[in-house]
Image (cartoon, coloured by chain):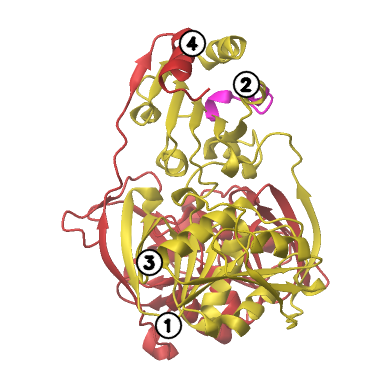
Chain colours: A red, B yellow
Amino acid sequence: MKVLVAVKRVADANVKVRPKADGSGADLNNVKMAINPFCEIAVEEAVRLKEAGTATEIIAVSVGEKSCQEQIRTALALGADRGIQVEAEGELQPLAIAKLLKAVVDKEQPDVIILGKQSIDNDNNQTGQMLAALANFSQGTFASELAFSDGKVNVTREIDGGLQTVSLNLPAIITTDLRLNEPRYASLPNIMKAKRKPLDVFTAEELGIDITSRLTLVKVEPPAERAAGIKVESVAELVDKLKNEAKVI
Amino acid sequence: MSILILAEHDNASVKAATLNVVAAANAIGGDITVLVAGSDCAAAGEAAAKIAGVNKVLVADNAAYANQLPENVSNLVVEIAQDYGHILAPATTNGKNIAPRVAALLDVDQISEIISVESADTFKRPIYAGNVIATVQSTDAIKVITVRGTAFDGVSAEGGSGSIEPLASVTDAGLSSFVSEEVAKSDRPELTAASIIVSGGRGMQNGENFQMLESIADKLGAAVGASRAAVDAGFVPNDMQVGQTGKIVAPDLYIAVGISGAIQHLAGMKDSKVIVAINKDEDAPIFQVADYGLVADLFEAVPELDAAL
């Protein structure tokens, strides 16, 4: 079984990103970049499928500028066999990314495509579902457990208020939620080895995909600030404030 | 211009999230049609018709929609989409599952989790865990949007008199099937609907200690939530997670216990009306957003709070 994993380069989860002073976008100057945490979970799941003998080959794909090769190398160090970068300048909308990934799916014909449920930069939560629609594949979003058997996969999904299990025909799109697994760290020898693994580069033009969007970013601004309140000295004072000042209990 | 809303429902009733979406639709302006796709869902259809401001309800009642599998429901929505200028869904796990599939099939960009309507084509939405608010404008002929419920006060569930029309069309994509569902049974309110939430973080140390919070929650009629750190550590299940990638809440009172206040957590609760933080680290970032902060060991303060209520 061939597995395609999509990874995205995003600002590190621990960085508090702020708007640029001119409101034209988020300020990413000198910000540490990393693989999107949910994409890391996707790579880990693919590697576990290979270790279990379910998957035979893992291809890591990323859409973006040349710098995203760093995140593809991270995926290769974690256990992916080869990489594909789809070169595209500037910020792309999820629909454009899904179209580019669809072109890669057509080329590679994977049985399973695993993506993060959302990227922590634009918080869209769209790409996996859109790719599933464009490819006319089944989808198992917000996955916390996968079980493959007889050409199908049972996906346990994290839904509001509980868990849902669906059975999907392959090829299937899976998007990862937090509890699917705990990603490993890449070992130094594997990081060195990853440098020699193959990495192909295609451009959107070569794939024949139109990536223009009808969505424009008008401006960005900081959120309304919430002022810090007061410190109370005791539980008794806290209860008194909640009852008599805030009147919420 | 007409607006189509995907109802959040369980076949028997319409969930409150739908009421928030109707409020967002009112801000856009136009005739409002609600789609109830389900199985044996006539009751949900009738409930949707009573929502204030709803003009029409389309009821697609078929086994193929029983569990609202996105492969089937998205095809149904696309069949009727051309009659509408906007398609709105709540930013619930169900709405997030279906709406992007609809958008891609229509070849339009989706606008996720809007928090305000600036005009019929311009919306605000949070990015970077809510640290940046983006204003985006769409020139797509059909705008597919998910709505963050906490940002719009829900309309009344009563008082409307929309017409009800059956939709005979059946679209079974044959790609997926429902196996099972485990919905956590609890007498406490749902996180996103609760007016008071008591949440625990890594400071709780283990899952058993959450019983201390449950005891307080029961006295206050509150829901119990958790930070991502507590979920990551395996203390509690993911459906309790409040934060950027969990649930977004805005109750009247949010009590954060043993939660440091990571960006990801603040993104999910900082619009709460009153925030209380109990943490032994006085430099914890949670105190920067708390109305009332108590620097104390939670294992002393929480039982004391329980006794005082």
Q: Quadrant of residue B177?
A: bottom right
Q: Secondary structure at mark 2?
A: helix
Mark 2 residue type? Ile
Q: Quadrant of residue B226?
A: top right
Circles 1 and 2: CB atoms closer than 8 Å: no
Is residue A135 or residue B251 the one in the foreground? B251
The alpha-carbon separation of the residues under discs 4 and 3 comes to: 50 Å
The alpha-carbon separation of the residues under discs 1 and 3 comes to: 33 Å
Whether residue B205 is in magenta: the answer is: yes
Q: Which residue is mark 3?
A: A68
Q: Earlier in the sequence, mark 4 or mark 3?
A: 3
What is the magenta range? B200-214
Numbered disc in front, either 2 or 3 = 2
Q: Residue at x 56, y 81 (%)?
A: B81
Badges 2 and 4, same chain = no
Q: Which residue is mark 1?
A: B141
Q: Secondary structure at mark 3?
A: helix
Q: Earlier in the sequence, mark 1 or mark 2?
A: 1
Is residue A188 or residue B135 the one in the foreground? B135
Q: Chain of mark 1?
A: B
Tell me where residue B109 appears, x and y as whole percent: 44, 75
Q: Which residue is mark 2?
A: B216
- Circle on res. A192: none
On the picture, is B93 further left or further right than B28? right
